[in-house]
Amino acid sequence: MGWSKLKQDEVAVRRTALLKLRREGVRYDDPRIEALGYASPNAARRDLTRALEAHRDEEAAEVSIYRQQENERLDALLEAAWPRATQPSPVFDKEGNIVGEELDMRAIDTVLRLMDRRAKLNGLDMPAKTEVTGANGGPLQMSQAGDAELEAIMNAGPDPAPNLEGAPGEQPGDGSG
């Protein structure tokens, strides 16, 4: 049996307050989060995860409905443009005599753009290859950092002065690492 409307509202209010505090950077073990009625920091963490998962499911359902509607619209447009793009039409001279047949190039372009839009909408194209590099186009330096180090980097501003010499204990150009 599901929750009562009152219980659902209480949970929504508590989760909204939790989300607000977390956006402000309040830690799960802060007394303000405990004051919301959570038995432990882990209980608050689990509740926030449940709220985010529920939102993700709703969002995925809406995206699916939108994608279906867009595909139906593209189907209708493609159906209208397809005959002109695939069946040659007569070409007339100045006197009105048929001198040949040709495909409608504008209709072909329209069909190709519709097909391109469908491929993008449904994720049919291969993803573009991207490469992430470190300073001066060199290899990206990866390392594990503690909470204090991450916080210092985040608070350093737009340029946290990267270590241009490489990882600790590494000499420039010695090929270690």
Image: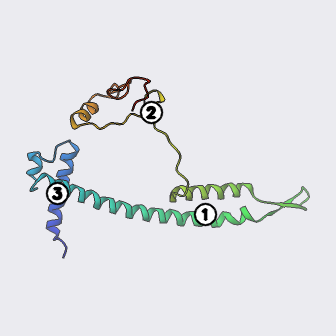
Q: Is residue 119 above or below residue 150?
A: below
Identified at 38% across, 64% down, the residue is 61
Which residue is tagged 1? 77
> Mark 2 Cα within 10 Å, few/some/many (few <14, many 20+)?
few
Query: CA separation, marks 2 and 3?
Result: 47 Å
Label 3, on which residue?
13
Asked if the residue under mark 2 is in contact with the one under mark 1, i.e. CB atoms within 8 Å, the reply is no
The answer to whether residue 171 is above or below residue 48 is above
Is the residue 34 above or below the residue 12 in the image?
A: above
Q: Which callout, 2 or 3, points to the residue nearer the camera?
A: 2
Please name the residue shown 24% across and 34% down the image. Answer: 151
**Is label 3 in a helix, a strand or a loop?**
helix
Q: Position of residue 63 (x, y in %)?
A: 42, 61
- Single out the residue that lies furthest toward the bottom: 1
Q: Residues within 10 Å of mark 1 (few under 14, many from 20)?
A: some
The mark that comes first in sequence, 1 or 2, is 1
Look at the image and tell me in which quarter the N terminus lies.
Answer: bottom left
Residue type (three-letter) at the residue carrying disc 2: Pro
Mark 1 vs mark 3: which is more N-terminal? 3
The image quadrant of residue 3 is bottom left
| Residue highlighted by disc 2 | 139
Q: In which quadrant of the rendered view does residue 143 lie?
A: top left
Find the distance from the CA under tag 1 to the CA under tag 2. Answer: 47 Å
User: What is the three-letter code of the residue carrying label 1?
Assistant: Leu
The residue under the point 21% across, 50% down is 19
Which of the marked residues, 2 or 3, is nearer the chain's N terminus? 3
